[in-house]
Image (tube, rainbow, N blue to C red):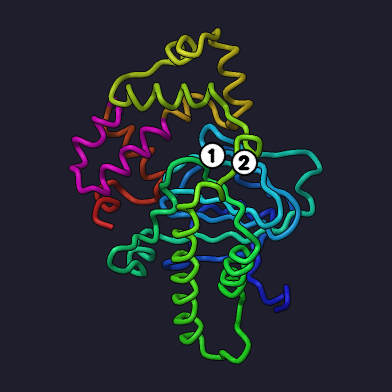
């Protein structure tokens, strides 16, 4: 299995959206230049470390991963690459993006293949070597631009669906074993971010000021703004805005009406909601609701 046969995503490629239907799998090398500020997307993401080290922050937790570790990122969860100087230059990892619709289509009766993204506890795992090598094998096959002795693209697509089903089938079973999840020594908590996030969730329908957030974490406004940007890579204002957009997107996906959604997500006027929603999701709220 040659390295040159893997689909590549350059470290300089800042793309955080899918261009293929259903799923995309890439190898990525080195410290990424994109994804250094909090972002989110409407598809699932798996990061598997092939070589070296890699760190990522999911909401209020930073995970420091090594070779063989795997990180699962749910839809609409804010996350970012966590820079550590000179630590990730030799990093190699497999990135898997997969849509809700794809996993729903692959799921059978009695097994939701997306459940592994929503379990309690750690979002990063280190599996025993036997299982880790098996999962790595499926990911590498998915990442290959072509498979030996499979010259027909349609045949590779059919095999890929099989590899995806096997990968997520085993992954869901393994993620039920809590001993495979990261322990506290392998991750760093960010209590301030957690407190701010929880406060926003509780008051999402209301106007939320920066003074309120600073007071909630017992800091002066300017100290809070500096520390928050330092930890998350985004301003507190944009964090609140993104939390509102995530809530709106989730409610629209459940079939709620556009009018009640933008109001319940805390937007003060429809034009502001529409402008920010289209900029973030690329479609109107009505179109998003029908997807």
- Mark 1 sits on what residue? 58
Q: Magenta stretch containing residue 274, yes or no?
A: no
| Vertical relation: 280 (above or below) 139 | above
Residue 261 vs residue 189, the one in the foreground: 189
For marks 1 and 2, give the CA distance. 8 Å
| Residue sticking out furthest to the right | 86
Where residue 291 sits: x, y (%)?
28, 58
Within-10-Å neighbours for mark 2: few <14, some 14–19, many 20+: many
Where residue 73 sits: x, y (%)?
49, 49
Q: Magenta stretch containing residue 261, yes or no?
A: yes
Magenta-colored span: 241-268
Q: Residue at x 44, y 51 (%)?
A: 117
Q: Which mark is residue 90?
A: none
Where residue 166 sits: x, y (%)?
47, 71
Is there a contact, CB below 8 Å, between mark 1 and mark 2?
A: yes
Element under label 1? strand
Q: Residue at x 46, y 22 (%)?
A: 196
Count of numbered labels shown in the rendering: 2
Element under label 2? strand
Q: Is residue 197 found left or right of 204 in the rendered image?
A: right
Q: Earlier in the sequence, mark 1 or mark 2?
A: 1
| Vertical relation: 247 (above or below) 48 | above
Residue 244 vs residue 135, the one in the foreground: 135
- Magenta segment, principal secondary structure? helix
Q: Residue at x 45, y 60 (%)?
A: 173
- Mark 2 sits on what residue? 63
The N terminus lies in quadrant: bottom right
């Amino acid at each position: 299995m040659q390295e040159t046969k893997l689909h590549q995503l350059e470290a300089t490629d800042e793309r955080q959206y899918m261009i293929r239907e259903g799923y995309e799998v890439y190898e990525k090398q080195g410290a990424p230049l994109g994804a250094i500020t909090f972002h989110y997307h409407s598809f699932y993401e798996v990061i598997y470390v092939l070589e070296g080290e890699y760190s990522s922050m999911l909401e209020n937790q930073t995970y420091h991963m090594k070779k063989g570790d795997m990180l699962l990122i749910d839809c609409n969860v804010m996350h970012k690459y966590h820079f550590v100087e000179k630590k990730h230059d030799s990093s190699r990892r497999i990135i898997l993006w997969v849509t809700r619709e794809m996993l729903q289509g692959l799921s059978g009766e009695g097994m939701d293949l997306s459940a592994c993204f929503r379990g309690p506890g750690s979002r990063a795992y280190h599996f025993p070597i036997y299982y880790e090598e098996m999962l790595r094998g499926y990911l590498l096959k998915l990442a290959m631009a072509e498979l030996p002795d499979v010259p027909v693209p349609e045949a590779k697509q059919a095999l890929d669906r099989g590899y995806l089903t096997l990968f997520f089938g085993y992954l869901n079973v393994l993620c039920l074993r809590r001993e495979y999840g990261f322990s506290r020594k392998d991750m760093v908590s960010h209590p301030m971010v957690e407190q701010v996030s929880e406060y926003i969730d509780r008051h999402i329908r209301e106007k939320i000021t920066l003074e309120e957030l600073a007071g909630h974490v017992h800091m002066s406004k300017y100290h809070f703004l500096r520390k928050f940007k330092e930890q998350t890579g985004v301003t507190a204002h944009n964090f609140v805005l993104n939390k509102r957009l995530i809530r709106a997107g989730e409610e629209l996906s459940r079939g709620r009406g556009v009018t009640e959604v933008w109001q319940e997500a805390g937007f003060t006027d429809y034009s502001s909601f529409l402008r920010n929603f289209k900029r973030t999701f690329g479609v109107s709220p009505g179109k998003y609701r029908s997807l």
